Image (spheres, rainbow, N blue to C red):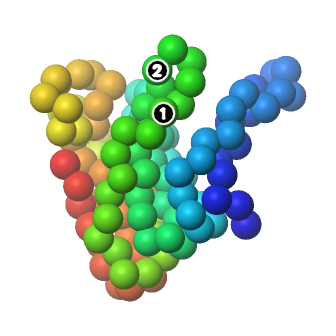
C-alpha cells in the first residue's frame, strides 16, 4: 500500500501526477459529483480534500477526527461551498467519512 495517489491518463497510459499528503497508506478515494474535487482517506487517520487547479491536483483541506484508519468516503449530491466562502456548482456541501474506529464523521 502507498501513501501517494497516482493520477493516470488512461488513453495515453501516462502518469499525470503523484499526490503526496498522507503519511500512511491511502485506503479510499472518492471523486466529487462534478469531478473537480477528490477526497482521500488513509490509515494515518486523516481525510484529505484535493482540488484541481490548472490541471494539477492541490491539497485543499486536511480533515482530522478519526481515531483509526479511514476506510470509506461519500460526497453529498447537494451543492454548497466546502468552507471556502464561495458557493459553486463544483463544491458539494458535505463529505462523510467512516473509519475502523466505528465513527461516521460528516464535514461541511
Decide which of tag 2 and tag 1 comes sooner along the chain: 2
Up/down of 100 relative to 85, above or below: below
Disc number for residue 95: none
User: Could you tell me residue 87's position as x and y percent?
Assistant: 16, 24
**Which residue is the site of mark 2?**
53
Q: CA distance from mark 2 to mark 1?
A: 7 Å
Q: Is 87 on the left-hand or right-hand side of 29?
A: left
Disc number for residue 58: 1
Q: How crowded is the residue under tag 1: few (<14 C-alpha within 10 Å), some, or many (20+)? A: some
Q: Quadrant of the N terminus?
A: bottom right
Q: Secondary structure at mark 2?
A: strand
Up/down of 63 relative to 1, above or below: above
Residue positioned 86% across, 28% down in the render: 13
User: Could you tell me residue 106's position as x and y percent?
Assistant: 23, 60
Q: Is 81 on the left-hand or right-hand side of 104?
A: left
Foreground residue among 34 and 60: 60
Q: Are marks 2 and 1 in contact (CB under 8 Å)?
A: yes
Residue positioned 32% across, 65% down in the render: 64
Can residue 78 be seen in the rendering of this structure?
A: no
| Quarter residue 37 falls in | top left
User: Could you tell me residue 102's position as x and y percent?
Assistant: 35, 84
Can residue 20 be seen in the rendering of this structure?
A: yes
Residue positioned 29% across, 46% down in the render: 76
Amino acid at each position: 500500500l502507498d501513501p501517494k495517489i497516482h493520477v493516470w491518463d488512461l488513453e495515453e497510459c501516462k502518469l499525470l501526477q503523484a499526490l503526496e499528503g498522507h503519511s500512511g497508506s491511502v485506503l479510499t478515494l472518492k471523486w466529487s459529483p462534478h469531478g473537480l474535487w477528490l477526497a482521500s482517506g488513509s490509515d494515518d487517520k486523516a481525510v484529505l480534500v484535493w482540488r484541481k487547479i490548472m490541471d494539477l491536483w492541490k491539497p485543499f483541506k486536511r480533515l482530522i477526527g478519526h481515531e483509526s484508519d479511514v476506510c470509506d468516503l461519500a460526497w453529498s449530491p447537494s451543492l454548497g461551498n466546502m468552507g471556502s466562502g464561495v458557493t459553486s456548482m463544483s463544491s458539494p456541501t458535505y463529505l462523510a467519512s467512516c473509519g475502523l474506529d466505528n465513527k461516521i464523521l460528516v464535514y461541511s
